[in-house]
Image: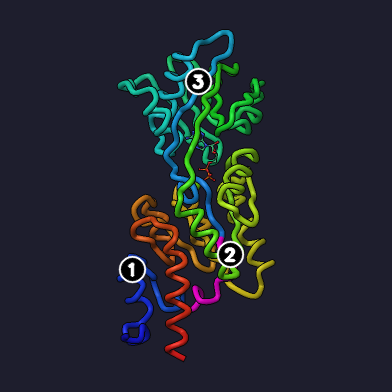
Amino acid sequence: SIPLGFFGGIGAASRRGILIKGSNYLEALKDVSTVVFDKTGTLTKGKFRVNKVISSENWNEAYVLEFAALAESYSNHPIAISILNEFNKEVDKSRVKDYKEISGFGVSAIIDNKKVLVGNAKLMIQNGIKINESSDVGTLVYVAIDDEFAGCLVISDEIKNEAIVAVKTLKEMGIKTIMLTGDSKEISKDVAEKVCIDKFYYGLLPNDKVEKLEELEIENENGKILFVGDGINDAPVIARADVGVAMGALGSDAAIEAADVVLMDDDIRKIITSIEVARRTRKIVY
Ligand code: ADP
Ligand code: MG
């Protein structure tokens, strides 16, 4: 066979659908000792489904879903898309005023002169809203109308099969695996157990993810850290990692721009291919 070094590792990688933005990243890739994954859209499909709508006494399910859909109508977060899919009707955006996306928390808007908040428990706590905890398993999206708890949507995501394979293979290669997420402890624990990841950190805001990565880089002195994300809210972490990897198909322009490596077809098993190509290239070059 033709030695890979003949073509160079970047060419070999590109033929496998992996864009490596420079030979210095090929150098870093061969020394990767820890792989850090974002959860939503990276280990999971990021295609949420609304399983259940719960309402408080003063509201009903149809209103809760409608207000949630209106409030989310300007967001492109996977959670927002699932709520709009479940609503499955035309949304009259002219009813939505003062829309704000609160990264890592949810959204707020004025709808029909009512103050509406849609997001996680942290968003509700921050706004002094008392919520009824639900025992349902899933990502819980709370809805508050005029500072009063109106209801909750139970949303679920699916784990990617490739994620299970990728984590298993990385562990066999002696590489440590970690997950970072803004989601709740319960969901994070469930995903972490299902993909058999070594360690996970939850409840992180986009900036907390950057800080956590910096901490991990200090701990991980003998090797490089690779971070892989889908790009929704995580471009700063991709930019900060020794090797930042973005999904090419699903990822945002900002993430692709910030990344050192782009997986053209979003298959996270290609992280392993990237490391293997980098290791093989060195053997031939030196
Ligand atoms: P992850 O870290 O899993 O990729 P994000 O950082 O995108 O997730 O979001 C963290 C959490 O913030 C979500 O699990 C959700 O609870 C909440 N959230 C973020 N954006 C929205 C939104 N548009 N609507 C409702 N909740 C949201
Ligand atoms: Mg994400």
Residue 185, quarter of the rendered image: top right
Mark 3 and mark 1: span between their CA atoms? 43 Å
Examine the rendered structure and indicate whether residue 152 appears above or below residue 279.
above
Examine the rendered structure and indicate whether residue 165 appears above or below residue 187.
below
- Give amino acid for label 2: Lys
Locate residue 35, reporting x and y percent.
56, 63
SS category of the residue bearing label 2: helix
Locate residue 258, reporting x and y percent.
43, 60
- Mark 3 or mark 2: which comes first in sequence? 3
At 42% from the left edge and 28% from the top edge, which residue is drawn?
83
At 56% from the left edge and 25% from the top edge, which residue is drawn?
142
- Give amino acid for label 1: Arg
Q: Is residue 176 left or right of residue 66?
A: right
The residue tagged 3 is: 53
- Mark 3 or mark 1: which comes first in sequence? 1
Mark 1 and mark 2: span between their CA atoms? 22 Å
Residue occupying the far bottom of the picture? 286
The residue tagged 2 is: 171
Locate residue 233, reporting x and y percent.
48, 47
Neighbourhood count class around disc 1 (C-alpha, 10 Å): few under 14, some 14–19, many 20 upward: some
The residue tagged 1 is: 16
Residue 237 is tagged as: none
Q: Is the CB–ligand 1 distance for label 2 below 8 Å?
A: no
Mark 3 and mark 2: span between their CA atoms? 39 Å
Range shown magenta: 27-35
